[in-house]
Amino acid sequence: IETTHENGQAAALNKVIKGICNAVIVGATVLLIFSITNIVTSSISAEQLETTMFLNQYRMGSKTLTSEVQSFAVTGDAQYYDNYMKELEVDKNRDIAWAGLQENDITAEEWAKLEEIAALSNGLVPLEERAIKLAKSNDTSNATAIVFGEEYEATVQQINTKTDECIEEIQNRIGKKQNTFFMIMLVTEVVFILVFI
């Protein structure tokens, strides 16, 4: 009777130990998945922030060029021309932003839109050069007509609209990816609590 009782206790103890081992293994696995998912989610958030920052930097560079060339066309003040050239050759916000975006996770479709924005921006250069040449020769009236003209203003508006759309699309795509990982984290948290219980 004593031997049978001891065997029964040993079997029950083995069963408990086996259950604990299984719970620890499952818990450790779930914890590992949670940690990896947390790291990935943080990385996605950082990428989203950085991508938005670069897109805004590109837009800021374009706006600076537009503002300075328009001011130079109206006033003929060399300070505005110097500011224009500084943005173009020293600050290079657009170039820095473009290089930064190339390092990030941008889809082919998004790149096509970014290249369209860049093409529109580059399309303003001949108009700006003409306006600068006229302003330098004190013909501010014709210089102003170019940089405040329908073609120039319409292109600037297109750049702003397309940049806004592109930022929104990229944020939505990254946001969906983020939500997926948040759901995985939530599920792993629930499983970990259940395993612990």
Image (tube, rainbow, N blue to C red):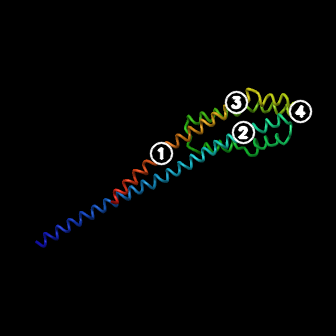
Distance Cα–Cα, label 3 vs label 4: 25 Å
Give the structural element (helix, strand or loop) at label 3: helix
Point out which mark residue 155 bears.
3
Residue that carries the numbered disc 2 in the rendered image: 63
Which kind of residue does numbered mark 2 sit on?
Lys
Which kind of residue does numbered mark 4 sit on?
Asn
For this view, does 132 lie left or right of residue 156? Answer: right
Distance Cα–Cα, label 1 vs label 4: 57 Å
Residue at the image position 79 percent from the left and 32 percent from the top = 129
Say whether marks 2 and 3 touch (CB < 8 Å).
no
Give the structural element (helix, strand or loop) at label 2: helix
Which quadrant of the view contains residue 92?
A: top right
In the displayed orientation, state which residue is furthest to the top: 150
Residue that carries the numbered disc 4 in the rendered image: 138
- The answer to which of marks 2 and 3 sits earlier in the sequence is 2
- The answer to which of marks 3 and 4 sits earlier in the sequence is 4
Distance Cα–Cα, label 1 vs label 2: 33 Å
Q: Position of residue 131 (x, y in %)?
A: 81, 31
Say whether marks 3 and 1 touch (CB < 8 Å).
no
Packing grade of label 1 (10 A; few <14, some 14-19, many >=20) is few
Which quadrant of the view contains residue 102?
A: top right
For this view, does 188 lie left or right of residue 147? Answer: left
In the displayed orientation, state which residue is furthest to the bottom: 2
Which kind of residue does numbered mark 1 sit on?
Asn
Say whether marks 4 and 2 touch (CB < 8 Å).
no
Residue at the image position 56 percent from the left and 47 percent from the top = 47
Q: Quadrant of the N terminus?
A: bottom left
Residue that carries the numbered disc 1 in the rendered image: 179
Say whether marks 3 and 4 touch (CB < 8 Å).
no
